[in-house]
Image (cartoon, grey):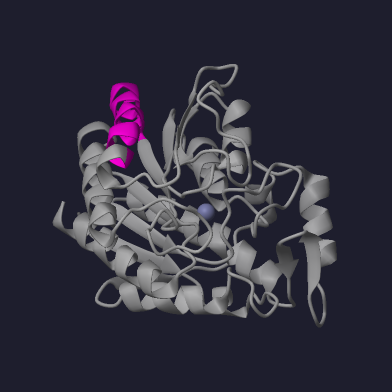
Amino acid sequence: MKTLVLTSDAGFEHRTPDGHPERVERLEAVMRACEGHEIVHAGPAPREALERVHRPDYVEAVFASAPEEGLVSLDSDTWMSPGSLHAALCASGAVTAGVDRVLDGEAEAVFAACRPPGHHAEPDRAMGFCLFNQIAVGALHALESRGLSKVAIIDIDVHHGNGTQAAAEREPRIVFGSIHQGWIYPGTGAAHETGRHGNIMNAPVEAGTAGQAWFAALQPILDRVEAEKPDLLMVSAGFDAHRADPLAGLALEDEDFARAGAALAALAKHAAHSRLVCVLEGGYDCPALESSVRAFLRALDAA
Ligand SMILES: [Zn+2]
């Protein structure tokens, strides 16, 4: 698949306290992994794009919280520096621009390499390093601005995508499936959480799960998305299920992320008009993040 990388240098200006796992070096590692790909720099998403997912008073509160100097915390582990608001707006801008590139036929696959991550951000609160939920913003952009009927989101980050699930709970045109380590942060994502529209799937796996068993747990989500025939497949591409990751306890290797990339690209080809938009979420061991993003992108290229 022809794969474009969407990014913004604003991501380097989002600062967190010393020792915080979600740090500038992550984006440096990811951009090294993206070398050799065509890179497109995105600007900020407009406020109305955010307000399709987030309550206007929440968006206003994030704008109002941006410090002129130093750091402020929005929750126990979510911080803003002077550059964070612009970084978060550009992260959403990278995803909406990536959706447009794929829908306009300029690429089959997009990898949005941005900071901060987004999948924990709920309609009315920041959580888990996330300010705005850029993958949900991108999905609503596809549905509302581009007239698509159905968007599938598969979340392979090791943590449950509670914010994206909250967006899907009130938007039946989104089909959301998450595979994650169960019973760790944020504590949601049990298998019985299917949503009142039945458009949500959760596959929690136990600590220590490695590639083979992880894929077996992912398969029902892939099968459901194949049956749904979405107009676009989006992926919350977190790489913190890697064996080396310090924040969780799964045991995937680089080649498992290559296999995931190949499976997701094949699914997009067969069931979603060869339209795939992947969005960086977590991944906190920088060498493992770099090598697994590189493996993932190679698999997209080869699909
Ligand atoms: Zn994560």
Q: Which residues are magenta?
A: 214-231
Q: Is 215 located above or below residue 289 in the figure?
A: above
Q: Nearer the viewer, residue 199 or 250?
A: 250
Residue lying at 61% horizontally and 27% vertically, measured from the top left = 169
Q: Quadrant of the N terminus?
A: bottom left
Extreme-front residue of the structure: 208
- Residue 223 part of the magenta-drawn span: yes
Q: Is residue 254 left or right of residue 28?
A: left
* Residue 34 x %, y %: 32, 72
* Residue 110 x %, y %: 35, 57
For residue 224, what is the image quadrant? top left
* Residue 189 x %, y %: 56, 33
Q: Is residue 303 left or right of residue 3?
A: left
Q: Nearer the viewer, residue 49 or 242?
A: 242
Q: Is 82 located above or below residue 180 in the figure?
A: below
Residue lying at 40% horizontally and 44% vertically, measured from the top left = 234
Q: Is 169 located above or below residue 26 in the figure?
A: above
Residue lying at 24% horizontally and 76% vertically, measured from the top left = 36
* Residue 105 x %, y %: 28, 51
Q: How many marks?
A: 0
Q: Main secondary structure of the magenta part?
A: helix
- Residue 89 part of the magenta-drawn span: no
Q: Nearer the viewer, residue 213 or 43?
A: 213
Q: Is residue 172 visible?
A: yes
Q: Is residue 274 visible?
A: no
Residue lying at 69% horizontally and 52% vertically, measured from the top left = 127
Q: Is residue 204 left or right of residue 303?
A: right
Q: Is residue 59 left or right of residue 149?
A: right
